[in-house]
Image (tube, rainbow, N blue to C red):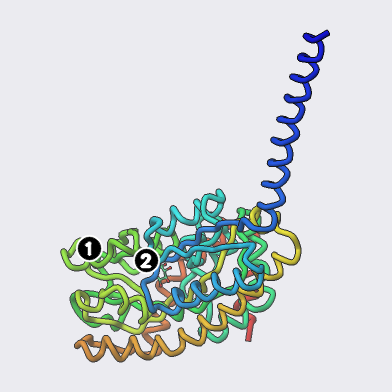
């Protein structure tokens, strides 16, 4: 009898233990839903004070505020989480939640996004944004989503021009024989080859040293990046070819985004769009300030005459032809861009 009670007692004790444990688990689950935030990591290549850096910090702040702390985004700036091509893969895999990417290095994985990397495809930055804010931007976003990325908003990155250590570039033949750093995308290598130069694909963080040690003679970028990286200190000729206008995205891992409750999706999207407006405003100021700063440091900036701009365009035409031959389904998207007023 006694033994029986003892057994029963033991059983009750075990049940109690399970109940306590269960209770603790339930408490932890409800606590995680109400207290613990989702921790997201975000990648950005630019340094403190750069328009994108300021805007991405603002984005993180807005995300937290608009989700009442349910999402905590920590931004890692200055490329500390690796180079851009690797970071794009990390966001596609979901190891990083967010990236502030140029559509340039995304092009090799998403052909729709690659249309913006065709030289001279846009006629001006203003026209580019009219296109990006309309059907063209939508088609590019759809293409990105097929590859696991959702573009929440687009940032301004102005236009890219050539700069080098040797001389002003005024016509296509000036690029002949030059070693020019390009971003990772065959279209850019093709562009330099079409001019008779030697393309050198390289991570952004390596360009300063490469210019300084003559591993390359030149590169191409907008004024803010030319200035913020210090490239102007080692490559003092900036020639206004304006051959590329490449918008940038605030891109999120598609699964992370799609798994969010609708209210949080709305909050994250709104946060990206509000902070993108800040980026565009800061950009318009920084492009002027950077130009002034490099001029003051002794950089020689030269315009390229209209007929020579047309010559650059004609010389780069094989890049368009080659791309459209490989991607005939994108002919209509390129037409849509060209028909955007
Ligand atoms: C900058 C752009 C960066 C990066 C860089 C580069 O203009 O904002 O994301 O693409 O150019 O040349 O690598």
Which of the 4 image quarters holds residue 287?
A: bottom left
Position in image of residue 318 (x %, y %): 46, 66
* Residue 268 on image: x %, y %: 64, 68
Name the one closer to the observer, 224 or 262: 262
Q: Residue furthest right?
A: 1
The residue depicted at 50 percent of the width and 77 percent of the height is 55
- Categorize mark 2 by other alpha carbons within 10 Å: few (<14), some (14-19), many (20+): some
The quadrant the C terminus occupies is bottom right
Q: Which mark is residue 210?
A: 1
Mark 1 element type: helix
Query: 177 left or right of 184?
Result: left
Say whether residue 291 is left or right of residue 321: left
Horizontal and vertical percent position of residue 50: 40, 78
Q: Are marks 1 and 2 in contact (CB under 8 Å)?
A: no
Q: In the figure, residue 184 lies in which quadrant? A: bottom left
What label sits on residue 78 in the rendered view? 2
Q: Does 240 appear above or below 176?
A: below
């Amino acid at each position: 009898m006694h033994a029986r009670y003892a057994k029963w007692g033991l059983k009750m004790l075990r049940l109690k233990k399970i109940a306590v444990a269960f209770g603790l688990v339930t408490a932890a689950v409800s606590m995680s839903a109400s207290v613990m935030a989702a921790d997201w990591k975000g990648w950005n290549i630019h340094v403190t004070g750069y328009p994108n850096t300021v805007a991405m910090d603002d984005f993180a702040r807005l995300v937290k505020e608009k989700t009442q702390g349910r999402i905590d985004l920590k931004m890692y700036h200055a490329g500390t989480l690796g180079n851009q091509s690797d970071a794009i893969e990390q966001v596609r895999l979901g190891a990083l939640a967010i990236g502030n990417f140029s559509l340039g290095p995304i092009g090799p994985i998403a052909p729709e996004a690659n249309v913006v990397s065709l030289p001279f495809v846009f006629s001006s930055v203003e026209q580019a944004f009219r296109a990006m804010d309309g059907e063209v931007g939508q088609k590019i976003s759809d293409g990105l989503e097929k590859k696991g990325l959702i573009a929440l908003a687009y940032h301004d990155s102005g236009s890219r021009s050539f700069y080098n250590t040797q001389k002003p570039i005024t016509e296509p033949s000036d690029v002949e024989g030059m070693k020019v750093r390009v971003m990772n995308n065959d279209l850019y290598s093709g562009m330099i080859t079409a001019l008779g130069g030697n393309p050198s694909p390289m991570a952004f963080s390596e360009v300063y040293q490469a210019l300084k040690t003559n591993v390359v003679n030149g590169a191409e970028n907008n004024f803010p990046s030319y200035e913020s990286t210090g490239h102007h200190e080692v490559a003092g000729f900036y020639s206004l070819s304006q051959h590329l206008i490449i918008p940038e995205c605030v891109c999120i891992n598609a699964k992370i985004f799609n798994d969010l409750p609708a209210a949080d999706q709305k909050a994250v999207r709104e946060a990206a769009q509000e902070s993108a407006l800040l980026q565009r405003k800061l950009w318009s100021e920084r492009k002027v300030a950077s130009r002034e700063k490099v001029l003051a440091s002794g950089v020689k900036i030269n315009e390229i005459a209209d007929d020579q701009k047309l010559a650059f365009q004609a010389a780069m035409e094989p890049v368009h032809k080659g791309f459209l031959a490989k991607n005939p389904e994108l002919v209509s998207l390129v037409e849509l861009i060209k028909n955007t007023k």
